[in-house]
Image: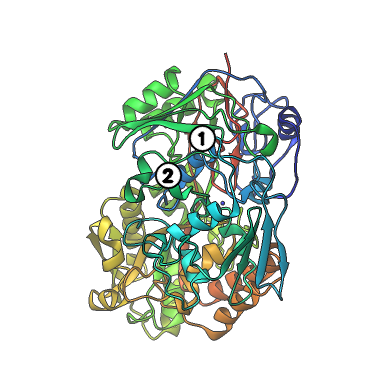
Amino acid sequence: MIRRKQALAITAVIAALSLTAACGGGDGEKKSEAKGAGGAAFNAATTGVVNPSTEKGGELKLWSPQDVDYLDPARAYYGFVWNMQRLYIRQLLAYDSKPGEAGTKLVPDLAEALPVISNEGKTYTLKLKDGVKFEDGTPITSKDIKYGIERVFAQDVLSGGPTYLMDILDQGQKYPGPYKDTDPGKMGLKSVQTPDDKTIVFNLASANSDFSYLLAMPASSPVPMAKDTGATYTNKPVSTGPYKVESFTAGKGATFVRNENWDPKTDTIRTGLPDKVTFTVTTNPDDMDARLLSGDIDLAVDGTGLQQAAKNKVLKDPNLKKNADNPFTGYIRYFAFAQSVAPFDNIECRKAVIYAADPKSLQTARGGPTSGDLGANMLPPGVPGSDKGYDPFGLTKGQPQEDKAKEALKACGKPDGFETTIAVRNNRAPEVKTAESLQASLAKVGIKATIDQYDGKLSSSIVGSPENVKKKNYGVIVMGWGADYNSGSGFLQPLVDGSFIKPNGNHNYAELNDPEINGLFDKAADAASPEAAAPLYTEINKKVMEKALYLPINFDKAFVYHNPRLTNVYFNDSMGKIDLAVIGVGK
């Protein structure tokens, strides 16, 4: 989950935040019930800032039923960890600390300004701010940022994180990473230059309007070479933000304390209000929910929301409900049709499944309206270029369209229906339930669907293998998806660009390889800015939906409760989570 104003004092930042309104909402979404600005009310944090404050002190208590993958910025890939990393690491650019859509904009962080782009979009030049330091007081230089990026290339030592920077910056060099770098200063990556300690220059092989988003990812964080311990760096990464890691135990949690060498004058993103932040891993989500509702802890930081029992309790109690929110997560839940598996090589057979589906039943299977809005297309709210109202198959009406399904079956030469297999992860109960819902709907028009549940941890080799999909006759695949960065390409390209089809770890389950769609991605990359590229993603989304290769289930939401003592509470659309960058702990 992933920009334009510079320097304001902390007080001014919070004041501005309290007045900011996001573009959340849309058809079918319940608006905030707040009576006054900044007050607690159901969904208030999805449209503005709840309890704005500049008060410092206290301990922020974060819990999660899932441990972090890594604290190391080069290796972290969990969305909630990227949110936690806003507490202790900084990048050249960052997502703005504002609610809603405003939080999807990039602003300078360690950099003085947004990049100067030259050479027909292929060269990005940035300069560092004065006074930015590591936790030991050492000044951060451009070489530290380059070194941090070079670490991503050391996949034999630091696997786990995203590799977009490798894909763009290697350019045939086959750079092995700094641990095998023969350059005396370990600065051997040729596409990144550091002409002086404050300047860094990125030379791309071709224009890429999304490159700035990559500079805001944790993998672009500076790392001091002298403090890099390789695979064990994750246990105590060096801080550049308001907090530093005091302790970390895998499977248990972590404690973050103030970084005395963080200068708030250099940081327009973070406020550093709590004195301490603790993170605790639990194996009992229901116990965590009980502690949360009682006020013993502050936030379930994984962001997936309350378990069903706690959700029901909150929905029935107005005093609890006013501290809950139902934000979009940035994910979409969907069915994909494999074109390599007959009869889904025929568009009319695919349309038959889409029209036969019961959208309301699918939504109910995922947990009802609080699980997400009815899906209409493949580009969810919050992603530039999205159009929540675009609904070519009438899915948001919430009713099966059996007459249209039967017409499509005739058109595809299967008037009496056909047989197929639905592949679904066995460790995702809502996905299994949606598969069962679709199975029941298809039976009503003569389509017999068999459900095959597979081990979810093997997705990359089961449904991620086009060869295995065809072998197993997986005509329909149940899946969910969220972007690594807030762009139409970051969201759609792995799903629908033909160049992204892989023999394993494939996400283009429909095996869509359309020259026109592929070309539109190239055109978007050449655009002058992310804003200029957005209309092209709108066009791509429409062309994809016209091919009837996907059946959207819902635009995903989470039902999230926060301790009422928290201040500056809002959901940032770039992450789909409560932004930890400015959160405080009230009395």
The answer to which quarter of the image holds residue 210 is: bottom right
Q: Is 195 on the left-hand or right-hand side of 555?
A: right
Question: Secondary structure under badge 2?
Answer: helix
Query: Label 1 sits on what residue type?
Result: Asp
Q: State which quarter of the image contains the C terminus.
A: top right
Query: Label 2 sits on what residue type?
Result: Lys
| Residue situated in front as seen by the camera: 272 or 526 | 272
Badge 1 density bin: few <14, some 14–19, many ≥20, Cα 10 Å: few
Q: Which residue is mark 1?
A: 136
**What residue is rendered at 27% in x and 56% in y?**
456
Q: Are marks 2 and 1 in contact (CB under 8 Å)?
A: yes
Q: Which mark is residue 227?
A: 2
**Residue 29 in the image: above or below residue 561:** below
**What residue is rendered at 63% in x and 53% in y?**
197
The x and y percentages for residue 559 are 48, 37
**Residue 526 in the image: above or below residue 107:** below
Label 2 vs 1, first from the N-terminus: 1
Q: Is residue 400 in view?
A: no
The x and y percentages for residue 262 are 59, 33
The residue most toward the top is 587
Question: Secondary structure under badge 1?
Answer: loop
Q: Is residue 226 in view?
A: yes
| Residue situated in front as seen by the camera: 378 or 461 | 461
The x and y percentages for residue 579 are 57, 37
Q: Is 152 on the left-hand or right-hand side of 204?
A: left
The answer to which quarter of the image holds residue 179 is: bottom left
**What residue is rendered at 64% in x and 33% in y?**
263
